[in-house]
Image (tube, rainbow, N blue to C red):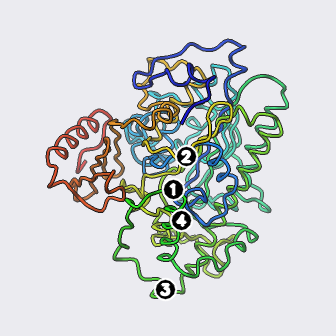
Amino acid sequence: MKLLPTLSVVCISWCLWSCQPVSSPDAQVQDERPNILLIMADDMGYSDLGCYGSEIRTPNLDKLAKSGVAFRHFYNTARCCPTRASLLTGLYPHEAGMGAMVSGADSNPEPGPYQGYLNDQCLTLAELLKPTGYATYMSGKWHVGEKPEYWPTKRGFDKYFGLISGASSYYEVITDQPRVRQMAYNGQPWTPPKEEFYMTDALSDSAASFLTQHFSQENSQPFFLYLAYTAPHWPLHALPEDIARYKGRYDSGWEALRQERYLRMQKEGVIDTSFQLPLWEEDIPEWSQRDTSLHWERRMEVYAAMIDRMDQGLGQVFETLQTNNAWENTLVIFLSDNGGSPEDITGRKLNDPAVEIGLPGSYAAYRKPWSIASNTPFRRYKRHVEEGGIASPLIIHWPNGIEPTERVDSYAHVVDVYPTIANLAQATYPDSVRALRGKNLLSIIENDSAPSERPLFWEHIGHQAMRQGKWKIVSQAPAYQWSLYDMQQDPTELNDVSTEFPKVLEQMSLTYEQWSEEVGVQKRGE
């Protein structure tokens, strides 16, 4: 894989382990810097895009991958809030104050690694880019600070529209205690209209609108747009015309779907034969033994329709760029915040059983069996640090800077997005905040054939992991017993080899403990 020649000096030479700053550009260089479109899906599994093996219709993202770069091994942090914090700051979640989930708008948490909002020891991408001349926009889910003083326009964004909170109805904003949700337009609370509102469309529309307004100003200022969809996070809500496209598609069940995707992924080169399918978890019934009253087929039909609609919205955004002659010099990055979700939300008591799943008044999730199919071929799902919880699609596209290529084999992490963008924006990263943790993704692409021994770390609600080279260790709460996996031979983590390589396990566990002390991971029992 080769970067286009014009980028050889700017993109490759910046080694972000040392995070050396680059001087701010003058006006002429500003004109040449790329626009940046950063897109995040919510609770979408590794195999849920067509270009990653899915049957779901995603033509716009598929074209993006075909004319850009797709990674085989890209990692998030296993859950929404921590991943968003790392994406925005280039730090591990604990360093940014988001080691777990967001704190409530009426709470006063103790400051620290688990305070539940972005701290003042980090700099968001918007805060970094704005002083260099970038216009900074965000449309979508924030989820890293509920109080107004922590909202996007207080953290560097010129314009913002979207959901401040976590999951909410796609047709309205939930205001019932204790699950009050907030939307905002710029720095003010915003309430959607009672009719003809659908969250995914609203986020796509606002993103396209921000771009249209930007281009109408007829200046040379580049833009940074962070588009953070809530789709396909529960509740399962989709428009009837999109659901109809998948009617009957999932009647054969979750076992058949996972096998179908697995074979397609091999055929299309997403994975190879070293990726062996794990056994189904014991608490998942065979399809023939399912509880038919739960309307399992409908759940997956709606889930697929939500991803389909997101892709349609991206087509609208991409067309806006193309119409304004900005497509060639826009860096587009797409990823997901965690693996497919196994969560059962019936306990929230927001569902009207008389309403069909997907329509206003319903409030359901697709649950564990379908989430395992979403995360094909991996084990586990959201919240966990096996590959099913932390593996994400990653697509990077930039016609002026990156040649289309086959899939990248090197592993990378969400902390790598920040230094990649900072480098291309030629932005100075200050010494007064925590040092960045990531590497330039373009350098990773350029050196894909070189083996990496770079360590990566995870901790979320007691689940712990580390990867270094071909080795990965995993420890799940509450047992806290380390397992060791050879990710070259066993990328789906089926064979614990800790007894065969005790020295490897010992050294990695010590390195992990050093990292956990450094970032402030809670000790067991605290």
Tell me whether circle 2 and circle 3 mark residues in contact (CB < 8 Å): no
Determine the secondary structure under disc 1: loop
Mark 2 or mark 3: which comes first in sequence? Answer: 3
Which one is in front in this view, the residue at disc 1 or the one at disc 3? 1
Residue indicated by mark 1? 269
Residue 264 shows which numbered tag?
Answer: 4
Name which residue type carries label 2: Glu
Q: Please state which of residues 257 and 335 is positioned toward the viewer in this rendering.
A: 257
Distance from Cα at disc 2 to Cα at disc 4 = 16 Å
Mark 1 or mark 3: which comes first in sequence? Answer: 1
Residue indicated by mark 3? 291
Question: Badge 2 local density, few (<14 within 10 Å), some, or many (20+)?
Answer: some
Image coordinates for residue 261, horizontal then vertical, percent? 52, 67
Mark 1 or mark 2: which comes first in sequence? Answer: 1
Which one is in front in this view, the residue at disc 2 or the one at disc 3? 2
Which one is in front in this view, the residue at disc 3 or the one at disc 4? 4
Image coordinates for residue 260, horizontal then vertical, percent? 52, 71
Residue indicated by mark 2? 406
Name which residue type carries label 1: Gly
Tell me whether circle 1 and circle 3 mark residues in contact (CB < 8 Å): no
Above or below, 431 relative to 507: above
Tell me whether circle 1 and circle 2 mark residues in contact (CB < 8 Å): yes
Seen at 65% across and 53% down, the residue is 62
Figure quadrant of residue 281: bottom left
Residue 341 located left or right of residue 277? right
Distance from Cα at disc 1 to Cα at disc 4 = 8 Å
